[in-house]
Image (cartoon, rainbow, N blue to C red):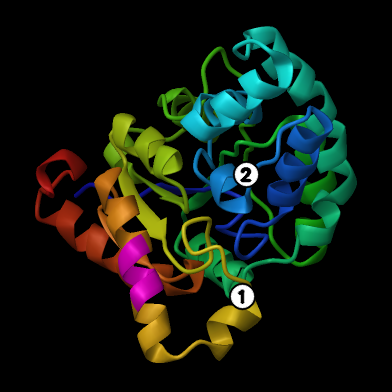
Amino acid sequence: MTKLKAVVFDWAGTVVDFGSFAPMGVFVEVFKQFGVEVTIDEARLPMGLPKWDHIDAMLRIPRIHDAWKASHGRNPLSTDVDDIYRVFVPLNEEIVDRYADLVPGARETAQALRARGLKLGSTTGYTRSIMARVLPLAKEQGYEVDNLVCAGDLPEGRPTPMNMYKCFLDLGVWPGYAVVKVDDTGVGIEEGVLAGCWTVGVALSGNEAGMTVDAVRNASADELAVVRRRATAVLKEHGAHFVIDTVADLLPVIDEIEKKLAAGQRPWTDR
């Protein structure tokens, strides 16, 4: 009987930084420095991509593209993405430690998974220089993983499956259907789907909801239901097999996946 061997987690919006807020203000500030006003909602649209690709995707949003052309007298170029990226990364490094609190339940979920004999992997749209600030803070809170694959580590990142393939190699696990990918973004879900993994989207702690812990706790059931439905629809559209509120709700899903594996089901047949 095939059993699960590993769970691979995203970082911001999944296990740290409830609501995925760390990059948002930086995107707004950096684009302003280059003469273009952007909104938080626009900055959230490409979330999950490597940050160079994220900036490139923002410049392709029609309103931002037109605003850039109006400000600079020409269409944005890849060299402009390079310039914005060079400013973005150090600014994100400066503030990311303010947004490194664990999502409630992340530590306990990780401990329970290890107790079951599962390995813990991770991928992220952050660079290694940014994650160098996050890793020790997560460790201080009791959360550690067995590997880390960052934006820029491989020739191509999300939504390709390359990050997941690197996780398989680092963790010594295979096949893909013995691995679960947990993420709050569509492209993060896609990298799991394309690698043949089970995928679990997190709706309320992530980018799609964009809410703080307190905002979620203080929202009414009806308000949360609206946010949950919207986030779930997006994550399902990208291929999520399951959608939960936060990683604190993961263990029952792991049990369900184990049952599916025992019955001979595979991710690509479970639609």
66 part of magenta stretch: no
Could you tell me residue 22's position as x and y percent? 73, 52
| Residue at x-position 51% and y-position 38% | 46
Could you tell me residue 243's position as x and y percent? 33, 62
Could you tell me residue 236's position as x and y percent? 27, 52
Could you tell me residue 110's position as x and y percent? 56, 63
Quarter residue 179 falls in: top left
Would you name the residue on which mark 2 appears?
146
| Residue at x-position 61% and y-position 32% | 149
Amino acid type of the residue that numbered disc 2 sits on in the rendered structure: Asp
In the displayed structure image, the side of residue 175 where residue 135 appears, left or right: right
Would you name the residue on which mark 1 appears?
104
In the displayed structure image, the side of residue 73 where residue 120 appears, left or right: left
Q: Which residues are magenta?
A: 226-230
| Residue at x-position 16% and y-position 39% | 268
Report how far apart the C-alphas of labels 2 and 1 lie in the structure. 20 Å
Dominant SS in magenta: helix
Picture layout, residue 254 above or below residue 68: below
Q: What element does badge 1 sit on? A: loop
Q: Nearer the viewer, residue 203 or 39?
A: 39
- Choose mark 2 or mark 1, whichever is in front: 1
Amino acid type of the residue that numbered disc 1 sits on in the rendered structure: Pro
Quarter residue 30 falls in: top right
Picture layout, residue 70 above or below residue 93: above
Please tell me how crowded label 2 is: few (under 14), some (14-19), or many (20+) other residues with Cα within 10 Å.
few
229 part of magenta stretch: yes
Picture layout, residue 55 above or below residue 26: above
Among the two numbered marks 2 and 1 on one chain, the one whose residue lies closer to the N terminus: 1
| Residue at x-position 40% and y-position 26% | 161
Question: Could you tell me if residue 152 is visible in this image?
Answer: no
